Image (spheres, helix red, strand yellow):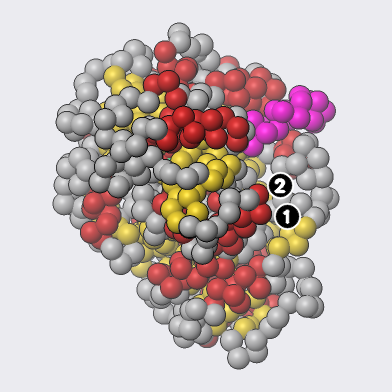
Amino acid sequence: MTTSTAQEGASEAAAIYPPPQRLVNPENGVKPWCSSMEEYETLYKESINEPTKFWTRVANELITWDKPFTRVSQGSLKDGDMAWFPDGQLNISYNCVDRWALQDPERVAFVYEADAPGEASKVTYGELLKQVCSLANVLTSFGLRKGDTVAIYMPMIPEAAVAMLACARLGLVHTVVFAGFSSSSLAERVADARARVVITADEGLRGGRPIRTKAIVDEALLTCPEVEKVLVFRRTGNEAVAFNPDRDVWWHEAIASQRPYCPPVSVSSEDPLFLLYTSGSTGKPKGVVHTTGGYLLGAAMTLKYVFDIHDGDVFCCTADIGWITGHTYVVYGPLALGSTSVIFESVPTFPDASRYWKLVEDHKITQFYTAPTAIRALRRHGDSYVTKHDLSSLRVIGSVGEPINPDAWTWYNNIVGGGKCAVVDTYWQTETGSHVITPLPGATPAKPGSATFPFFGVELAILDPQTGEELEGNDVSGVLAIKRPWPSMARTIAGDHKRFLETYLRPYPGYYFAGDGASRDADGYYWIRGRVDDVINVSGHRMSTAEVESALICHPAVAESAVVGAPDELTGQAICAFVTLKDGIEATDDVKVELVKEVRHRIGPIATPKTLILVDELPKTRSGKIIRRILRKVVAGEADTLGDLSTLSDPSILDVLISKVAAAL
Ligand code: 6R9
């Protein structure tokens, strides 16, 4: 189990922050969607005890169905055959775009804050509809049909969302690959998803620096011959970007010849909407599959209740669309509610550490959603970057991606929220599709560091990790599990349903196993303890230790490697790699630099090991298995509690290991 400073909160008598009065009794009289714990409990109980009534109501309230569903759900976690609203039909782009464009074409769908400060622009729902339709017609002209897969490798620009929505309009399955991934990571995902088309941009821009987006796609596609077309959006216009006229098509040229209307293709609620690759315990990333109706409902409903979205709100989630948070809370959630969503292309410290707060002031953002790692980093720069801006438009501020330590929570609440906003620490995963444990801003008294209580329809359990037995009552710790299917849960892993079952549903039969440790305190609040598998969380990004190890092994100098997460004040965890070199290769600093480069090249900069330690031996069992537990303990500074060492084949290596770690960290 990983360590995190949020853990400490559970044992202390944590401070309780009631919902701000300003939200519960607002001056403008607009009540929060859920304005008391009693109301939360009533709705929660209904969602659990009368699920058909509850889901029928919310699914009809939030979604426009082409063909209404007659059944709410079927299947079970035991059998892994869950389906929601299975006989219903709908189109997501119609729900996210047409509904609002027809009603009010001038309403702003996206505020685009470009990398360069002062270069903001807006996309109205009316314009968005035309753009999505034109692009959908381009995709049709490529011969794509319902069920085909399209890979999207783009910067954070509105066109990335347009690309997703154009796919959804035609029933195409999109797979967005985070544009910080390397060409080989992109190639692996494009091939696994069997994508026939890649949508990209000439270059990206981050913090004033160009990113060679198209060049990375070109490199990736050297090993993906099945890709027929690459559609290229012109972001920077750098003329040096290579263009292959047999395969590449300019976005602006292609849409110019297309009609700006395209009828939406009605799909089954259970047709796949997207694949999103995420790291698991083994080296190969998993293509998590989300379907249509249930996912859209989860996105819309959580955004409405957790961020308390009302007409006229401007919602800003700083996540990249390459992650699930960007899918659900930059694109699908806000648009499903007809709200305004901010697309932020830059980085929080460009040109200085006030960028986010200037953004809030400039666009009168009402809800702001970011990651603890950003909060911790910005806090280091000092309060003045925040306090010089007028943040009075904010009502709800959210956190996601990793446990937020109580100190960072308190700073976020006091300095960013000015003590007048609700802080929502939202726990969820790529696989859950939308929030599963979260406070509701007008209702839940918060405890800093706790994600508080389950969202509607989510029935939680804490299991004994060894016996799988459910731990009843309060004041218990174990592994986190969910007891019944919920609408926005992943349905399978692309091309590998067996792996889906083995990863999530078979470890504890009848439960969804989240992969996180958790406890329920004396008041019933949930505290997430971090991953219990070989996944580490660096700045809120999931990294598989096995994936980093495989990248290291690719280097000809490496004999063996073991990667663990080390606690890190800023990024939560940091990648710490232990490497043994092949015979005859000298352990020099140059080798270390090369190995770090290898990982960056194979996976991307997000996988950069912060520490790389060359050792003569790794701790192993007598049968030759690396004991990562020992490495984890040593890097966490807990070498005095290494536990049972009876299986360690050569205990004499420990002293050297401990002193090398002490010198490196
Ligand atoms: C949405 C997202 C999922 C993993 C998850 C957990 C960690 C996310 C958290 C949190 C504590 C929170 N996590 N939110 N831990 N408190 N509020 O991040 O998805 O990239 O799939 O990561 O992130 O460990 O299992 P994903």
Q: Is residue 539 visible?
A: no
In the rendered image, which quarter is residue 559 located in? bottom left
Residue 378 falls within the magenta-colored stretch:
yes
Asked whether, in this view, residue 631 is left or right of residue 519, the answer is right
Q: Residue 568 at what x, y percent from top left?
A: 57, 32
Write down the residue under mark 2. 347
Badge 1, how many Cα within 10 Å: few under 14, some, many 20+? some
Q: Residue at x 36, y 49 (%)?
A: 281
The amino acid type found where label 1 is placed reads Arg
Q: Secondary structure at mark 2?
A: loop
Pointers 1 and 2 in contact (C-beta within 8 Å): yes
In the rendered image, which quarter is residue 222 located in? bottom right
Quick check: which quadrant has ligand 1? Answer: top left
Quick one: 252 or 218, which is closer to the camera?
Answer: 218
Q: Residue 178 at what x, y percent from top left?
A: 56, 58
Q: Residue 500 at what x, y percent from top left?
A: 28, 55
The amino acid type found where label 2 is placed reads Val
Q: Residue at x 57, y 60 (%)?
A: 598
Q: Residue at x 70, y 72 (%)?
A: 202
Marker disc for residue 206: 1
Residue 339 falls within the magenta-colored stretch:
no
Quick one: 634 or 443, which is closer to the camera?
Answer: 634
Asked whether, in this view, residue 463 is left or right of residue 361, the answer is left
Q: Is residue 488 above or below residue 401?
A: below
Asked whether, in this view, residue 462 is left or right of residue 147, the answer is left
- Please provide the residue range marked out in magenta: 372-394
* Labels 1 and 2: the sequence-earlier one: 1
Badge 2, how many Cα within 10 Å: few under 14, some, many 20+? some
Q: Residue furthest bottom?
A: 246
Asked whether, in this view, residue 528 is left or right of residue 82, the answer is right
